[in-house]
Image (tube, rainbow, N blue to C red):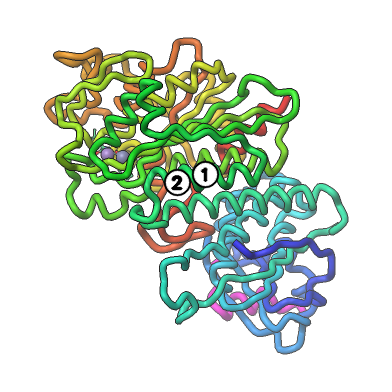
Amino acid sequence: VSTTIAPVAAPVPDLDTDTVVIGTVAGPDGPTPIGGSEQLDTALGGRLRQVLRDLGATGKAGDIVRFATLGATRAPAVLAVGVGVLADVTSKDGTFEPEALRRAAGAAVRALAGRPRAATTLALAGGRPGTAELRAVAEGSLLGAYTFESFRKSSKAGRPAPVEEITLVVPDAADPAVAAALRRASVLAEVVGLVRDLVNTPPGHLPPAKLAETAAGLAAGAGVAAEIYDEAALAAGGFGGILGVGQGSVNPPRLVRLDWRPAGAAAPALALVGKGITFDSGGLSLKPSTAMEWMKTDMAGAAAVLATVLAAARLELPVAVTGWLPLAENMPSGTAIRPSDVLTMYGGTRVEVLNTDAEGRLVLADALARAAEDSPGLLVDVATLTGAQIIALGQRTSGVMGRDDAVAAVRDAAGRAGESFWAMPFPPELRKSLDSAVADIANVAGGGGRDGSMVVAGMFLDTFVPAGTSWAHLDIAGPSWNGGEPYGYTPKGGTGVAVRTLLELAESLVP
Ligand code: BES
Ligand code: MN
Ligand code: ZN
């Protein structure tokens, strides 16, 4: 992402930019301009509200109208973006929901593609902005400027370029809190952009070894130690889950360990494990064609873990974070695992693989068991694990499950980050659905049983995490990918979900 953001404290009519972004809400009396638009209203002779009405603005989330200022302000145009229904997006003290501002900022910047410079007043929505508002508007603006053009012959043709320079209007541009918020937002947007790029990259261009090298290269540039286990090291280490899933592909599996170690830190305060299936065909339990179309998203968890460790390093977070990326390609072939084959996992547990399409839990089980050996204070895995997550929660809400303290910590972090995570139970009666006739455990309920299959997947993972380890599992299957139209700061394709939550989680562990 080459889009930049900088603060300015100039009066709105004097802003030197192509377009001034203001916010509107759907109030009791129709579309209403919000904080930050007062000087614009004055420059327009008090007619802003009427202009918005005349243009058919609604103020609802994502609503957009634009008008020319015809000399009334230095900027030639204004874009008014809806933040939402007043009562839904504000609290009693008049402050705005940061996530509503983040989405509005993103929608505005997306709509402004083709115009190089924009200034946004959205941080002023509720008066003097705090850290949450500054971060939200900066993040939304930068995330909304994302595009993925690497795989087009003529990248410019017909598609307007994203906004290049964003100006964030603030009361005091020299305030160090503003600089800190913008720095964090820029790092965050960059690593979320990395996740989107890695997810969007065609799977043939990003096999496990290539993804591992990409991760190690980025780690080296950020002061993060990286270790790559190739297939020989995986065999020597007894990583039967990762090897078993990878054995049907000509592209061998990998396990990447990343360590961000601020000075003085020893054991990781936070260990992250991300599912990294570079393509999920289902294996011999082959997926139908349309289900396979978007299975390049199956490494979104690994990409989110990489992104979080890189962000922790670039922000010099005083928290030791370890990331584990188990990477494999799930393919059908003469060497692939068969339904009913038994794998010996890291740690010795034997798993009967009744369905080769339930592969994510196999690579995660190895990595979780290994990650837990370092006694991290908190262990979190993030994975595009089940279609059942989408059935239960839809495409925009991720599931979180595991040990109560860890689940609570993730939910708190997600709330601060503005990401939607919903806690799911482990109903004990479902555990026996994984009983195997021959091995210690089966990877799915036999006979195609589908009851609670998001939480059954979580319960499978639970057996590989030692009791007493604070652990949470995040199922991001649906939210990792936007198959519909762009909305807010979310483009089509890879979304970069979970990175904001994981970074908040890491920050919550700062001593
Ligand atoms: N990668 C899929 C889950 C998935 C589905 C991710 C949709 C993103 C979008 C996973 O490996 C899978 O195939 N899960 C199976 C498990 C089943 C065989 C128990 C599923 O959910 O159908
Ligand atoms: Mn699968
Ligand atoms: Zn998968």
Residue 197 image position (x, y, % from top left): 48, 56
Residue 215 bears which disc, if any? 1
Q: Is residue 13 left or right of 141 when viewed as pictured? A: right
| Image quadrant where residue 262 sits | top right
Residue 34, percent from left and from top = 69, 62
Q: Specify the amino acid type for callout 2.
A: Leu
Which residue is rendered at x = 27% and y = 41% of the image? 330
Residue stretch rendered in magenta on the structure: 45-59
Q: Identify the residue at horizontal 61%, vertical 38% (top origin).
A: 503
Distance between mark 2 and mark 1 Cα atoms: 6 Å
Q: Is residue 283 visible?
A: yes
Viewer-proximal residue among 263 and 492? 263
Q: Is residue 486 left or right of residue 96?
A: left
Q: Secondary structure at mark 1?
A: helix
Q: Is residue 26 visible?
A: no
| Residue indicated by mark 2 | 211
Q: Residues within 10 Å of mark 1 (few under 14, many from 20)?
A: many
Task: Specify the farthest residue to the bottom.
Answer: 70
* Place of residue 441 in the rendered image (x, y in percent of width and height, measured from the top left): 24, 16
Disc ID at residue 106:
none
Q: In the image, what residue type sits under mark 1? A: Ala
